[in-house]
Image (cartoon, rainbow, N blue to C red):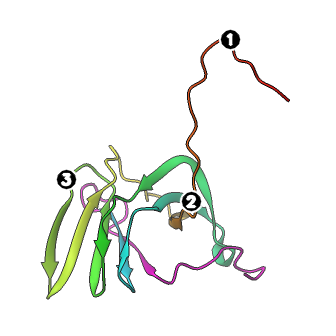
Amino acid sequence: MNAARPYLPLPELHLVGVADPGKPNLERIVIRPTQQLNLNGYGLAVGVSAGAAGASPIFDNCFWFPAIVVQPPSWVLIYTGPGEQRSSDWQGEAVLNLHWQRKFTVFTLEFLVPVLFRVEGAAVGQLLTPPYRLTQ
């Protein structure tokens, strides 16, 4: 990591960018896998661009990928609008179409950018029942 890019790269997935930003039913995030992998454990967030320093994620704007194996050469397209998952091919390459199920387009301002991330671990909590007995 360096000071100009305070995040680790994801060499297994290439985030190409946003196609047709702000256009309903067309706006989509374009990703190309560089190796075979399961998308489970990856996510997308909406961030405010900080230029070469990366981006700051916006609260409550997250997409989780389903458990699907992809491999190059292929395309993963995440449409921001509603729809159903489907697979197809384009010029001999596999295309996986996913949908974020948002009611409105997301990337309507030039400083909003997609942030691709990988989750390395997780903890699952439980619901507490009253009375809460919190210890120090």
Asked whether the beta carbons under mark 2 and mark 3 sit within 8 Å of each other, the answer is no
Label 2, label 3: how far apart the Cα atoms are: 25 Å
Would residue 119 be counted in the magenta stretch?
Answer: no
**Label 2, residues with CA under 10 Å away: few <14, some 14-19, many ≥20:** many
In the rendered structure, find residue 16 and report the number of the disc placed on it.
none
Quadrant location of the C terminus? Answer: top right
Q: Please state the horizontal and vertical placement of residue 63, each as a whole percent of the image.
A: 42, 54
In the rendered structure, find residue 84 and report the number of the disc placed on it.
3
N-terminal label among 3 and 1: 3
User: Callout 1, which amino acid?
Assistant: Pro
Which SS class for mark 3?
loop
Q: Which residues are magenta?
A: 1-26
The residue under label 1 is 131
Label 2, label 1: how far apart the Cα atoms are: 38 Å
Q: Please state the horizontal and vertical placement of residue 97, each as a whole percent of the image.
A: 24, 65
Residue drawn at x 21%, y 75% as measured from the top left: 95
Label 3, label 1: how far apart the Cα atoms are: 43 Å
Residue drawn at x 74%, y 80% as measured from the top left: 4
The residue under label 2 is 47
